[in-house]
Amino acid sequence: MNKPKQFAIVDIETTGNYAGGNRITEIAILIHTGKKIIEEYHTLVNPQSYIPLAIQTLTGITDDMVVGAPIFEDIAEDVYHLLQGKIFVAHNVNFDYSFLVKELKQAGYDWQAPKLCTVRLSRKILPGFKSYSLGKLCSQLNVPLRDRHRAMGDAQATALLFNLLLQRDKQQYIEESINKNTEHRLPTHLSLEQFSKIPEACGIYIFRNAKGKIIYVGKAINLKKRVLSHFTGSNTGLRRQQFINDICTIDFEESGTELMALLMECQLIKKHWPIHNRALKRYEPKYALICYQDIRGYDRLAVSKVILGVQQLRYFETVQEANLFLSSLMHQFQLPPALCTFYSPSTRTREDKRIDYTDLPSLDAYSATITRLLHYLDTNKQSFLLIDKGRSDGESSYVYYKEDKLYAFGFVDFIQQWTHVEDIVSYRDKCISNFYMQQIVLQYAARYPEKVSFLSNNSEVS
C-alpha cells in the first residue's frame, strides 16, 4: 500500500537573494497532508553575519533579534527530519530550496526532494492574473496574508494558497507535477511546454531573457539532457542564480553532427557575445611563425607568441607545433640555423643573436631563398570540402575549408555529382572564421578522412 503523500510548505528569510553568499535568518515549515496542516515549525536563525539594512527594512528582522537565536547547524537535524520524505512546496520554490540544500550540506546532511512551486502551479490552475507574486496573488484571491516577509506569515499564506490550488485543480496538474517533477526543476519563467519541445538530438540551444535578448548559447549531443543539466546541481553562487533567473525562453536548432554544433555555437557567440557566455574558449591562436628583418637586412624567421603589428606567416595552438613547423622549413629550404629562432620561455625573439655574418650566404642569395619560402607558404594552402550527415534523411551537412581558412558551412538537400564547390555553397553559409573554428575543422577532418574531398586552386576535386 502506498504511503500517503505529505508536503513540507516552507518559507525562509535570508540575508540576501542568492544562497552562495548569504545565510538564513528565519525558517517556517508546515507539514501538510494534502487536506490539513499536522505540524508546524518556526524559528529565527542566527546567520553569523550582518543583516543588510535593506533586508532589515523589508523583513523587520534585525541583528538584535537574531543574536540569541540558534545557528543553522543547531537546528539542522530537526529541519532535515521534517523535510525528509516530503514533497517540498514553496512560492518560487528554487529560491528556498537552494538555500536549504546548501545549509543542510554544510551541516553534514545530503538532502534532496521533489519540488512543487506555487507560482508555477498558480499560472496553470489560476490563469489570467497580471502578477503571481505572493502578495498580489493573495490580494486578488482574498487569501489572508499576515506578517508579510516573515517566514511564518508567508508560509501560512502559501499553505492557504496551496489548499485553494488543490481544490481548483480539475486537470490534475499537481499530481502530474509530482509524477513528472522535471517541471519544477526549470526556472520559474520557463514553461514545461517549451522544454518539452526540445529534442534529444545534436544541436545548439539558445537561452533568452524576458526581452528576447540572447543571454547564453550552448551546444550538445543530446539537447534535452544538456538543457536540463543547467537547472540541476548544487551550485548556489550569485552568477548561477542570476543566470537561471534570467532564462525565460529557449530556442534550439538541430545540427546533425557535433562538428556542425560546435561551428554553429561559435558563430552565434561571436555574433551576439551573450552576457552569460563568460567561460568562452580563447579563440585567438597563442603562437605564430613571424618574419622580421634584422639590422643587416636579413629576413629572420622566429616562433613567437602572437605579436600585434608583426607579419604572422602561420598560427599555432601549441609551441611544439610551431617549433616543428619551423624545423621542417629549415630542412626544406636549407635555412641557416643562426637566422631561425625557436620559441622557449626565455627567448626574446626581436633581439638579434650575436652571429658571424661572414658564415652566412650573401644577402641577395638568402633573400631569394626567403622569397621562395614565402611563395611556398602562400601557394601551399589547404582547401577541401567535408561532407557529413545532415539533420534528416536526404540532407547533408558540408564544411568548405578554403586556403587554410573556414570559408562556409551549412546544409544542402542533395549532394550527388558536382565539379565546383561553389555549386553547393550558399551565400548565407559564408562565415568569418577564427583560429578556434579552423582547428575544430582540421581536427575533425583528420579523424574522418573518408568524409573529406581535397580541392585544387580552382575549387575542383583534385
Image (cartoon, rainbow, N blue to C red):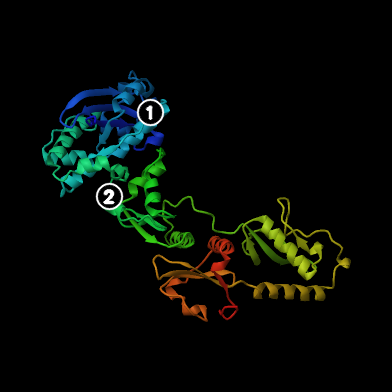
Of marks 1 and 2, the one in the foreground: 2
Q: Is residue 28 left or right of residue 18?
A: left
Q: Is residue 353 left or right of residue 91?
A: right
Amino acid under label 2? Answer: Leu
Residue 401 visible: no
x, y (%) of residue 279?
48, 50
The quadrant of the picture occupied by the N terminus is top left
Query: Which quadrant of the view contains residue 139?
Result: top left
Q: Is residue 379 above or below residue 276?
A: below
Task: Give the crowd class for mark 2: few <14, some 14-19, many >=20 residues within 10 Å.
Answer: some
Q: Could you tell me how far apart the alpha carbons at marks 1 and 2 are, in whole angstroms?
A: 29 Å
The quadrant of the picture occupied by the C terminus is bottom right
Q: Residue at x 53, y 62 (%)?
A: 437
Q: Is residue 318 left or right of residue 178?
A: right
Task: Report the residue marked by disc 1.
Answer: 104
Residue 224 visible: yes
x, y (%) of residue 300?
75, 66
Q: Residue furthest left?
A: 142
x, y (%) of residue 322?
68, 60
Label placed on residue 192? 2
x, y (%) of residue 260?
46, 63
Q: Is residue 372 above or below residue 436?
A: below
Q: Residue furthest top?
A: 68
Label placed on residue 186? none
Name the foreground residue: 59 vs 383. 383
Please count the marks in the image: 2
Q: Residue at x 33, y 18 (%)?
A: 68
Mark nearer the N terminus (1 vs 2): 1
Q: Secondary structure at mark 2?
A: helix
Q: Residue at x 44, y 75 (%)?
A: 427
Q: Residue at x 32, y 43 (%)?
A: 185
